[in-house]
Image (cartoon, helix red, strand yellow):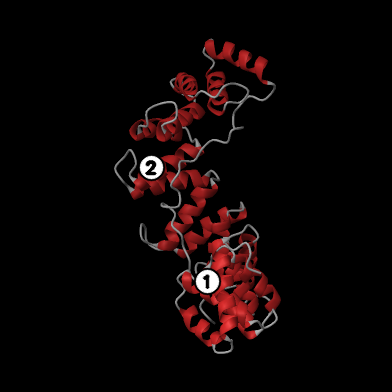
Amino acid sequence: MKKWFFYLTVILAMSSGLAKAHPDEGKAEGKYAHVKETLRLAAEQGDATAQNNLGEIFLYGDGVTQDSQEAVKWFRLAAQQGLANAQFNLGLSYGNGQGVTQDYQEAIKWFRLAAEQKHTKAQFNLGLSYANGQGVVQNFEEAIKWFRLAAEQGDTIAQYILGGIYLDGKIVAQNYQEAVKWLHLAAKQGHAKAQFNLGVSYGNGQGVTQDTQEAVKWFRLAAEQGHAKAQYYLGLSYANKQGINQDYQEAVKWFRLAAKQGHATAQNSLGLSYNLGQGVTQDYVRAHMWFSLATINGYSAAQENLNKAAQHMTPAQIAEAQKLARDCKKNNYTNCD
């Protein structure tokens, strides 16, 4: 059976920012004046949860003037009492330089304290810090340890990262079954990149029995979230009758969605669809336009396709196609139909 596609975006570069608490996590609700005063009274009496919640209100400017320094003050008081959420928030403040001078080592200190209390986002950020060597000596073994702990508690990005690490095989021994395990967990939580990579695993039979129908299922879920590569691969599945009935119109639909995100291979495939009249009315001008865009975006094989299409065109049609390509690119693919 034809070997399918392999794709991995890792991850450590992708995860450039620290995980943040959602503005609503652990924060008091209500209409703000009396809530703030009630919290302040409790906070001033040493209630750690109230201190952390008050810090979050100041951090996000929720019903009060936003004040990061005031937020840090309350986070610190709660963190010093051992409250994991506050330790995480204080670590995040140091990591982002928000309300305090940026200090990665201090961020690590507080993330570790929270992580040791099984705070999921703190575990993830500690893993990320070890992976990137930020505030600590780079140590992939430690990074994986903390990513795993976060992943085991259901952190979607940590699950995706672990899957990618095992898929890639550069940091640890390549293990497709372990990769699929973690990708599947993240994919079930709606992580588009995990869904795409899981589709690739099923398409290639890596870590699972090859199943092109299952591959299509996961490509579709990622594609519906706007994942350009998944849109392209779903289009390819329709065009090549892989895991689904052949349907050139559906193929064109998905090629177009990916092409409008600048996906060069999808642009070439859309050009071929116009060139051959598969799923669309044959149109050499449109074919030339998409081949031109694919070439500009680095898909070198599109140049030969462009030259072949040009053999069927008049100079005026070529000029029209070139203008369409320029306008399409200039308008960020919004006027390309």
Q: Quadrant of residue 268?
A: bottom right
Residue tagged by mark 1? Answer: 293
Q: How busy is the neighbourhood of tag 1: few (under 14 within 10 Å), some, or many (20 plus)?
A: many
Residue 314 location (% of width, % of height): 58, 87
Taking the image as shown, residue 303 lies to the left or right of residue 61, namely: left
Residue 20 location (% of width, % of height): 51, 37
Task: Mark 2 or mark 1: name the one nearer the start of the chain.
Answer: 2
Residue tagged by mark 2? Answer: 129
Q: Is residue 49 above or below residue 267?
A: above
Q: Residue at x 53, y 43 (%)?
A: 153
Q: Residue at x 41, y 52 (%)?
A: 13
Q: Residue furthest bottom?
A: 311
Residue 215 location (% of width, % of height): 60, 69
Label 1: which secondary element: helix
Q: Residue at x 61, y 55 (%)?
A: 188
Label 2: which secondary element: helix
Residue 240 location (% of width, % of height): 61, 80
- For badge 2, the amino acid type reads Ser
- For badge 1, the amino acid type reads Leu
Q: Is residue 294 above or below residue 30?
A: below
Q: Is residue 310 above or below residue 13?
A: below
Q: Quadrant of residue 92?
A: top left
Q: CA distance from mark 2 to mark 1?
A: 39 Å
Q: Is residue 175 above or below residue 236?
A: above
